[in-house]
Each structure stands twice: as structure tokens, then as C-alpha cells.
Image (cartoon, rainbow, N blue to C red):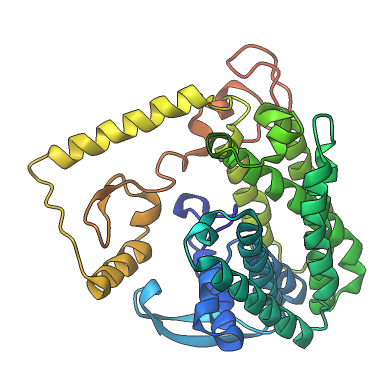
């Protein structure tokens, strides 16, 4: 489970939580049925946007069914999405996973850096690509042109240098995402939306590529790995306007599309997308955390974990595989993995912190919604003078 559109209970209205889970489980079960249990590991949060876009155009005519109990949702039944939307999302998930593994194989890092793993990783990438092609064929999507575009990425990276426009580096990602978004128009029975969704896909692909590069900037610098923001000399701060612009383009493109039900698209492609941008770059009331500041924050977190570990109330215990799996399911279903201040690791028993515990309050950066006019320029009297506040005030 990965992607920039990660869910958070504080950003998901209660009425939409079952619908979000329905798309998530629909994608997972689609991968299981058409590509095998192993393929469920490629479940991607961002790919859910494709399933949501298809449903948004079909409205009440969208396909669905009741799924049986599952440990990851507390052994509860769930109404899940079926049909073209989950198949399109599954195709995207498999393509992305295949491209990531292939990238590791060619770079000789990650899982491919382990002895004897390179050949196995290459076989896995080929298998996932073949499964993506098979699923895409059932919905009229030719995957081969998308694969050809993805393979151009390495050539572009090899030729770029200081001064290369970011849009040139992100072009393959934009093209593939645009094609997938446009195909959602046909599956949703509204071909007139193809151009609007293509524009939305272009913006989303650019935003996702740059957010991923900004997230990995410090780690890539430590490992000496290639990063588009470093290679072009733009840096993290220089990418901020491009990401904000892509976010605005995404919103404008979706507004021009004819959708019967916008509730889920607003949740994933507006609220979750804005949260992802703010999490990576900070709100306009905050700034990007420099590497030394990030080290200080990591040191503070280690100190808090150490204090918690030394507390006499803490009784960490290691678990076997099956006991740990049950513990993981319980933590996931109760959202402790996301928002708990402290919890025990399901297998190791070591203290952990929720992944977005510190980023669930959108407007607390400096009481942004009180000191400037959201969506417009401030009068200059407060901490947000002259900002264009992106905070979600709903």
C-alpha cells in the first residue's frame, strides 16, 4: 500500500469512509482474482483515483457487490466497487509496481542489490507487466504504448542536467497518467470527459512525480542516488511553485468535467491531494524543513521513543508470524498505524508512532484560517501576510 493519496481519518467524513474502503477493497480483490494473491502487494492508494473517476461518471449505475469478511477490516463484510473502475486501477497498480522493480534491477539497488535477487526481481517485473496487459485488454486498454513511454524515462534522466525544465523530466509520468485518466472517461460512459480527464491526469502525474522526488531528496543525497530536483538544480524549494501549479491545474480540469457524483473525487483529488502537498512542502504559513531541521525532529522522536521505552508501563514483546499478522490487522483496522501517538510493533514489540499523527490538523500551522483570508490574499496584518492559504477550512 503506497502512494501520495494516503487516507487519514481526520480528513475522511464518516459518510465517505465505507465508500473509500469499498474502492480500496475492490482494487485489492481485483488484483487477487485477475493476477493472484502476490499481486495484492501492489495495491496503490493513488490508483484508487481511477476507480473513483469511473464511479463518479456512472453514478448510481456503478457496479458493486458484497464482499466477505476480511481481517484488515475487522472481519466485517463490505460493499465493494467492481467492473471497469477497479480493473483500470489494477492495471495502473501493476504497471507502476513493474516499473519500480525494473528501475531497481537496472540500478542494482533496493531488493535487486541482494545476492541472487536481481534475476528474480526481473522475472517479477515481467510477470506484473504481463498481468497488467491482460487486465487492460479486458477493458479495451492497450498497455504496450504506456510501457514504451515508461521506458523512455531512463533516457530522459540520462540526458538531463542543470537547467533542464522539470516538465521534460516528468513528461513520461504525465503522459501515462493522462492516458489512464482519459480511459476512465470511456469506462464511465462519458467520452466527452476525455480531454478534461486527460488534463487532470497530466497535472496529477506531474504533481505525484515531484512530490516523490521532494520526499526522497535527502535520502537520495545520502545514498548518491539520482534525483530530478538535484539533477536539474531546482531543489525542493524550487519545485514548490510547480507542485502548487499542478494542484491548481488538477482542480480546474476536474471542475470542467461532467461528473454525476463528485463526493469521492473531491475527497481523493482535492482534500487528500492538498494534504499530500502540505505534508511534503508545508503550508504557506510554514516552510520546507531543511535537512538539519529534519535531523533535529528525528532526534526528538528518538528521544520520545526512548522515554516511552524506559517507562515501567511499557512491556514490549515479540510475536511469531501469525500472531504478529493478527496484531497488524487489529492496528490497521483501528487506525493506530496512522494516528496513534504510540503503539507496539506487531512483530517486534518495539514502540512505534502513527505515520500521520502530526499532520492531521490542517489549519493549526499558525491558526491560518484566522489570520488570513483563505483562498485570497491577506491584508498583511497577521502571520500569513500576502499568502494564498491552501488550508482546508471545511
Q: Nearer the viewer, residue 101 or 299?
A: 101
Q: Nearer the viewer, residue 236 or 261?
A: 236
Locate residue 391, reporting x and y percent: 61, 36
What residue lies at 49% left-to-right and 68% top-to-bottom?
116
Locate residue 166, reporting x and y percent: 80, 39
What residue lies at 51% left-to-right and 87% top-to-bottom?
66
Check the image and name the residue furthest to the top: 381
Q: Classify residue 3 by image quadrant.
A: bottom right
What residue lies at 82% left-to-right and 74% top-to-bottom?
144
> Relative to 169, is 56 above or below?
below
> Relative to 186, is 375 above or below?
above
Q: Quadrant of the C terminus?
A: top right
Locate residue 392, reporting x and y percent: 60, 41
Query: Is residue 202 in sight in this rendering?
Result: no
Locate residue 13, reporting x and y percent: 51, 57
Check the image and name the residue furthest to the front: 115
Please give left or right for residue 139 compared with residue 291 in the image: right
Query: Is residue 295 in sight in this rendering?
Result: yes
All told, the count of numbered labels is 0
Please give left or right for residue 180 compared with residue 77 in the image: right
What residue lies at 46% left-to-right and 29% top-to-bottom?
294
Please give left or right for residue 182 compared with residue 213 in the image: right
> Relative to 148, is 140 above or below?
below
> Relative to 166, is 204 above or below?
below
Q: Classify residue 48 by image quadrant.
A: bottom right
Check the image and name the residue furthest to the left: 312
Amino acid at each position: 500500500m503506497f502512494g501520495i493519496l494516503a487516507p487519514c481519518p481526520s480528513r475522511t467524513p464518516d459518510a465517505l469512509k465505507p465508500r473509500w474502503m469499498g474502492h480500496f477493497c475492490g482494487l485489492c480483490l481485483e488484483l487477487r482474482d485477475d493476477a493472484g494473491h502476490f499481486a495484492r502487494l501492489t495495491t496503490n492508494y493513488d490508483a484508487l483515483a481511477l476507480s473513483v473517476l469511473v464511479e463518479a461518471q456512472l453514478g448510481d449505475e456503478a457496479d458493486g457487490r458484497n464482499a466477505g469478511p476480511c481481517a484488515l477490516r475487522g472481519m466485517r463484510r463490505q460493499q465493494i466497487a467492481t467492473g471497469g473502475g477497479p480493473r483500470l486501477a489494477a492495471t495502473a497498480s501493476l504497471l507502476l509496481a513493474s516499473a519500480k522493480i525494473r528501475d531497481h534491477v537496472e540500478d542494482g539497488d533496493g531488493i535487486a542489490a541482494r545476492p541472487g535477487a536481481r534475476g528474480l526481481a526481473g522475472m517479477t517485473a515481467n510477470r506484473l507487466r504481463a498481468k497488467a496487459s491482460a487486465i487492460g485488454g479486458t477493458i479495451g486498454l492497450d498497455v504496450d504504448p504506456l510501457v514504451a513511454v515508461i521506458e523512455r524515462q531512463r533516457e530522459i534522466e540520462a540526458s538531463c542536467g542543470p537547467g533542464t525544465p522539470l516538465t521534460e523530466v516528468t513528461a513520461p509520468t504525465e503522459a501515462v497518467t493522462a492516458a489512464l485518466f482519459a480511459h476512465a472517461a470511456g469506462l464511465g460512459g462519458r467520452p466527452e470527459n476525455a480531454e478534461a480527464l486527460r488534463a487532470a491526469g497530466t497535472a496529477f502525474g506531474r504533481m505525484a512525480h515531484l512530490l516523490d522526488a521532494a520526499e526522497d531528496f535527502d535520502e537520495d543525497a545520502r545514498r548518491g542516488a539520482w534525483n530530478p530536483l538535484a539533477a536539474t538544480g531546482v531543489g525542493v524549494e524550487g519545485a514548490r511553485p510547480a507542485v502548487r501549479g499542478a494542484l491548481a491545474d488538477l482542480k480546474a480540469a476536474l471542475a470542467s468535467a461532467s461528473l454525476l457524483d463528485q463526493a469521492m473525487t473531491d475527497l481523493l483529488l482535492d482534500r487528500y491531494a492538498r494534504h499530500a502537498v502540505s505534508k511534503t512542502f508545508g503550508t504557506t504559513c510554514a516552510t520546507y524543513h531543511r535537512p538539519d531541521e529534519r535531523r533535529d525532529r528525528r532526534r526528538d522522536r528518538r528521544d520520545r521513543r526512548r522515554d516511552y521505552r524506559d517507562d515501567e508501563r511499557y512491556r514490549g514483546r515479540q510475536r511469531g508470524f501469525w500472531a504478529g499478522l493478527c496484531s497488524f490487522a487489529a492496528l490497521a483496522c483501528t487506525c493506530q498505524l496512522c494516528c496513534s501517538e504510540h503503539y507496539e510493533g506487531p512483530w517486534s514489540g518495539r514502540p512505534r508512532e502513527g505515520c500521520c499523527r502530526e499532520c492531521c490538523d490542517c489549519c493549526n500551522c499558525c491558526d491560518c484560517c484566522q489570520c488570513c483570508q483563505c483562498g485570497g490574499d491577506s491584508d498583511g496584518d497577521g502571520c500569513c501576510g500576502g499568502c494564498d492559504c491552501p488550508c482546508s477550512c471545511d
